[in-house]
Image: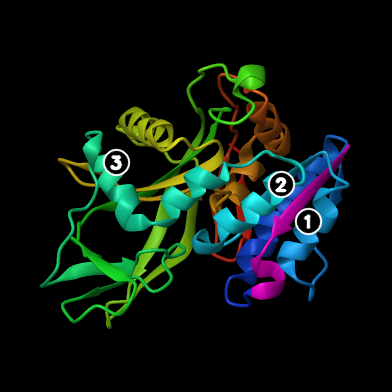
Amino acid sequence: MNILLAEYTVSHDPALAPEGRAMLDVLTRSFTKIGYTVYTPEEGKNFAEEITRLGKICDEGLVIAPDHLLAGYTKKLEDVTRSIGCNSFSIAVCANKKRTGQILRSHGIDVPGEVESGKRIVKQISGCGAVGVRITDGPLEDGEFGQEYIEGEHFSISLIGSRVVGETCLYYTGSAPLFLALNRQDIRFGPDGTVSYHGGETPFLHPRKEEMFELASKAVTVLGCQGYVGIDLVVTPGRIVIVDVNPRPTTSIVGIAACMEEEIGQLILDASYGKAPASVHLNGHARFTADGKVTYDRC
């Protein structure tokens, strides 16, 4: 069996390439271990053309790219082979951070309120992670919007959504997303207001973990996401707020894979056929940096 793992930043975005390489390496090792031959786009060549070329000789495929590019490249993959990631339509919705917040809010999910003036978090409507995110009371630039600043702890929920759209009659089961781990994020605020992501730790024990997962699971279901998804949250004594939905593998995958007995590749593959297990087994504790370096402690 052949699989295409198409990670965009490795050859097209030097700033994010170390993070992309770490995710790609984890997935490549995992799929190789379960018997797949892994194909990846050749560096320096047109990414879309490589997806089309290699996708035709692969049985499955998965694209990882910045959010504003992910839908288009995933559609390229869907046109030539079977995608085991989130579908391109849901990705396009999630890429619009403003629209995503409106949808989630309409379903009773707590998200940051939009703020047009004063001190606020400013981010790109179609951005990637913490890139370009800042606290400011200044004017917005083109393609940006403002949200209320929420003082709290920063976490992410990593989960895998079972097949919800596409090939529905064959594989849809109605199963809830598979919870992988709660991760604590290392988010830092610079003196100039810039927000930066420096990695995190997993798995993290928190008394409200089940509440966080239920909220993340609801968000994934509302948005129609499937495959590996990362949900970013801010938690305060009175609120659990979803601040971002990433319909793709995120950096936390490197820490989770270090702790998990199951193969992450097998889990993503099984979920795409509606056969994900009910739970996974994590042993020990991992810390990981933004560029994917992992320190693992076995309990």
Q: Give neighbour class at mark 2: few <14, some 14-19, many 20+ (Cα, 10 Å).
A: few
Which residue bears the numbered disc 2? 79
Could you tell me residue 264's position as x and y percent?
A: 68, 38
Mark toward the viewer: 3 or 2:
2
Residue 130 in sight here:
yes
Q: Which residues are magenta?
A: 1-12
The residue lying toward the viewer, choosing from 215 and 260, is 215
Q: For mark 3, give the secondary structure.
A: helix
Residue 296 in sight here:
no
Could you tell me residue 91's position as x and y percent?
A: 50, 48
Which residue bears the numbered disc 3? 104
Three-letter residue code for mark 3: Leu
Residue at 17%, 54% in the rendered image: 113
Q: Give neighbour class at mark 3: few <14, some 14-19, many 20+ (Cα, 10 Å).
A: some
Q: From the image, which quarter does the C terminus lie in? A: top right
Q: Give neighbour class at mark 1: few <14, some 14-19, many 20+ (Cα, 10 Å).
A: some
